[in-house]
Image (cartoon, rainbow, N blue to C red):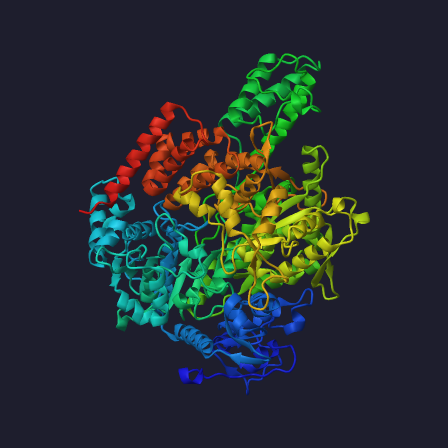
Amino acid sequence: IMEAQGLIPVPIFINGVEAHTIVRDLLTSESEIKAVERGHCSRDTTYKPQTAVPVDAIVNSIGFPLVGGPAGSIEAGRNLDVSSTLLRDMNVPYMVAGPLLLQSIPQWKTNGVLGLQSVVLYSLPELDGAIDTVVLGGLVGDKIALVPERVRKLTSRLKQWIKLRNTPKKDKKIAISLYGFPPNVGAVGTAALLDVPSSLENLLKRLHQEGYNVGNFVDDPDASGESLVAALSILCEDPVIAVGSKNMQRAVDAKIERAKAGDETVAATLARTGGGLGGAVVRSKDVTSDELENVVGKYMMKKIRRAWSEKERGPGVSSEGNLVVSGIELGNVWITVQPLLGVEGDPMRLLFERDLTPHPQYCAAYEYMRLDEKEGGIGAQAVIHLGMHGTAEWLPGQSLGNDRQSWSDELIGDLPNVYVYAANNPSESILAKRRGYGTIVSYNVPPYGRAGLYLELANLKDLIEEYRQERMTDESEESTDDDLKAAIWSSVQKSGLMKDIPLYLDASNKDTLVESADLPENLSTSRFNDWVAGLSDYLVELQTRLFSSGLHVLGDSPTDEELFSYIEAYFGDELQDHDPREIIADWHKQKKNESTESPLSDFVNFFVKTFFDSTNDEKEESEPEIRKEAYEILDLLSETTEEMESVIRGLDGGFVAAAPGGDLLRDGKSVLPTGRNIHALDPYRMPSAGAWSRGQRIAKELIRQHQEANAGKYPETIAVTLWGLDAIKTRGESVAIALSLVGAKPVKEGTGRIVRFDLVPLEELGRPRVDVLASLSGIFRDSFANIVDLLDDMFERAAMADEPIEMNFIKKHASELSAEGVDRPAARLFSNPPGDYGSMVNEVIGSGDWEEAESLGETWAGRNVFSYGRNEGGATKSGTARPAVLEKLLESTERVVQEVDSVEYGITDIQEYYANTGALKKAAENRKAIDPKTGKKKKVALSVVEAFTGSDDSTPIPVRDVEDVLRIEYRSKLLNPKWTEAMLQQGSGGAYEVSQRFTAMVGWAATSDVDNFVFDQAAERYALDDDVAKQLQKSNPEAFKNVIRRLLEANGRGMWSADDGTLERLRDLYSDADDMIEKGSAQQ
């Protein structure tokens, strides 16, 4: 098949496990030959120049790591440097393709690649930088059979990579896809932690330097990324789409003229000369259904028509019924916005329905992008998906191991996909890599900032300092200014801190809580002093809390101020004896000296050091280790330019080096520099030793807190969320928490691989086994199938253990289910249906299409009813719906646990936390009895563990109630003027970030509790502050409208109590914002 398509395969058969020796000794490439000639790399002495074959790509057909093969995959500390050096020097695509040796073809077609087979073909080769894995077949009976269509898929992708490599840069056609979801909230040209407009501008300039044709963009001093995004936003407007492609250029030109005339309803950046577009022109097409069928084929078109009738064809359809595909063109670069995934009111509809398809216009957009220019398409030879994250990799189809019926496989086709992705999210990047054929290029997280104190919080700090000073001058225990005490108490009430640091008349009696407006006369000074000490500690925590300051620009090196923020955040208190600014200045001097030294100066320095400077060695040895580490981190941070280098390397058809994903604070130096093809961890080494230690401590604290709040009673069931991202970044901390609650421990074989979770004897455990409802994300379920199987086996053994039920709550609940005739009563691992992802709660919140908060819990329960594990599914299925078991576990759940794995994303920053964990909490509460004290259903506690804190055994790991974490996060970010200013400086992207946090605030208010002061201060900060409101509206009118909409929604749903005057102003603002958007969309 390959030869018929014009490729010359060089089959190599190995007898053993050292496949890398073939690459080292018998293969070479044009890039390697040139590098050797120029002295940029050297070959091993085993290299055989007479027999070495120049190749354009390498295909690993057995899986496993390149170095060591099956043996290398289980040896602790195996050397990845060897494979990295070999593949980087070869600089050709390194792909994996092979048949499944442990699964039948029907099983693969039904469930995707499972268990050990996924580790062999995906997880382990990805550690070396493998891309574009293609499953070529599987077992038929006891024989291996290939699927010819899959071999053709491998061949077509190889051909396209090679064509991309061999095409002159000036002739390469490149597509750039931006993100624009959710609709109508100003999301066009945004991405997580990335300044997309500035990054786009950098990218176009670098492409020009490399010899790509980007039109006149670089030569135009008025051209800007913000203008390009503004023009693309116009093409996404419904009235513009309705008219069709023929009027799209006219619509952009009209907006440019209105901007020049001072129309405030149009993005101001379009008032620049030429609209600031650098000569970009609209390139669009009206695609008919027949034209779409010609490119996708009758089979796939039949699926589209079955899912999308003529009456409901989805978005992107003109009034004439054509599928409108649009973008703007600069030379040979076509920039577009990825189509919306669903329909208004149900924007993610197809994402979670395995039998559905993308809507017709979504399909047309990708097919038009790939279609040859001679046939009326763009003729792109590669696509860059700019920022985290798009939707193509989430389309219906196999969860792992694309086949012909997988829509990501169809739409990406043979197109090389360079995917620019946040370095701190290796979990979701796996899907982009595996389902979307993405060659990942990671980008750095933004610099960190300290929250500081502001407004009333700053005033409170001053009052406490004054109070302490007065106490120092008057040593009498009972004499202190009552006016100052009253001022502190008043300030605490204004700040909403009464719940965070409650004041009790008697610290040992929770019934003595002070809630009055004035301090009670019988409050002792000593009790007040103790309370003030705790209050002071809390303010210090708020003041020093970290947050992401702004957004990152692709390929930009950090400024000195940004380097300071990284270094200060990384080392924290360790830098007490070292000034970070001084370290950075010394580092600059060191780099300058290194760049100016010549061979002669090297000799002189050596001579002086050897014969005259006997103290030099002592000086080097005395250089503090902390400074050496700081210099190393500064070196790595300065290499963020590698981000752009790797994009170019990908477009050259080269090899992008691999590295683990993560963030500097949690994962250390190993995640730097960015610009790497990030991967996850070896799933057979989870949990790690460190994660196991922390997990035990966290479980112990969870139980302690529960007993303290429940008169010493042990919890019967705790729900533990197991997410792919936090599992990867914490090396399995959440798994360790679940094991520790049950009373189990990991067992390793001699190679270091974890092969079993053994139950700890009750005598050693010293308490009952706590039952666990394990809530798996779809990514965890698919990426860590081996862990899922081991956990399932452990729960089965726990349910059958010869132990009294009062000491084994797993057995207790399983026995009760068995008595009711329920099958598989020990099932404990629940997630979405096979191949599906997400709870859909965030989509419901986003659309506003819900009535009672209880319905959100039922949405979660309906989406997470499938049980997984080695005892589920059978030969052709990977999951089984078990509603009765889930119902029992939810009824007995008394606490939910969620880990937060990084500073960049707290629970208030993204929708997934309330949509999954908050909704799980609500589902459990729906099944509780009425609490006689409150007259409402009994609350289920939600414990949040910040996994980036308490890194050593001597440091406590904070385990906080969700309400406490919400207040801390809102105070340190959304309500913090420093964070506000950082977002306002980011233009449209920053405004969108603000907007999304208001949506999440409504989500948390629906599933938990958000204090009234949060809504009060958020309204004051972003809506009622004229200057801030004007900046938001100018930067992103739709984002500002969403801010107002969410505040009004919160009041309407009873989440926020606001005065009539505030509500009237908000209604006026909403009406004005709506009118402005309507006017801005009107055509001239």
Residue 1072 location in percent, x, y? 28, 34
Residue 818 location in percent, x, y? 67, 52
* Depth check, front residue: 180 or 823: 823
558 w.r.t. 402: above or below? above
Residue 100 visible in this rendered orientation of the protein? yes
Q: In the rendered view, does 478 fall on the left or right side of 303?
A: right
Query: Which image quadrant is residue 83 in?
Result: bottom right
* Depth check, front residue: 599 or 1076: 1076
Q: Which residue is painted at 36% across and 71% down in the image?
A: 299
Please count the marks in the image: 0
Q: Which residue is painted at 57% across and 21% down in the image?
A: 463
Q: In the rendered view, does 513 fall on the left or right side of 1022?
A: right
357 w.r.t. 474: above or below? below
Residue 670 location in percent, x, y? 60, 57
Q: Which residue is painted at 55% across and 45% down in the image?
A: 920
Query: Which image quadrant is residue 64 in?
Result: bottom right
Q: In the rendered view, does 118 fall on the left or right side of 761?
A: left
* Depth check, front residue: 943 or 929: 929
Residue extending farthest left? 1084
863 w.r.t. 966: above or below? below
* Depth check, front residue: 879 or 482: 879
Which image quarter holds the N terminus?
bottom left
Residue 826 location in percent, x, y? 66, 54
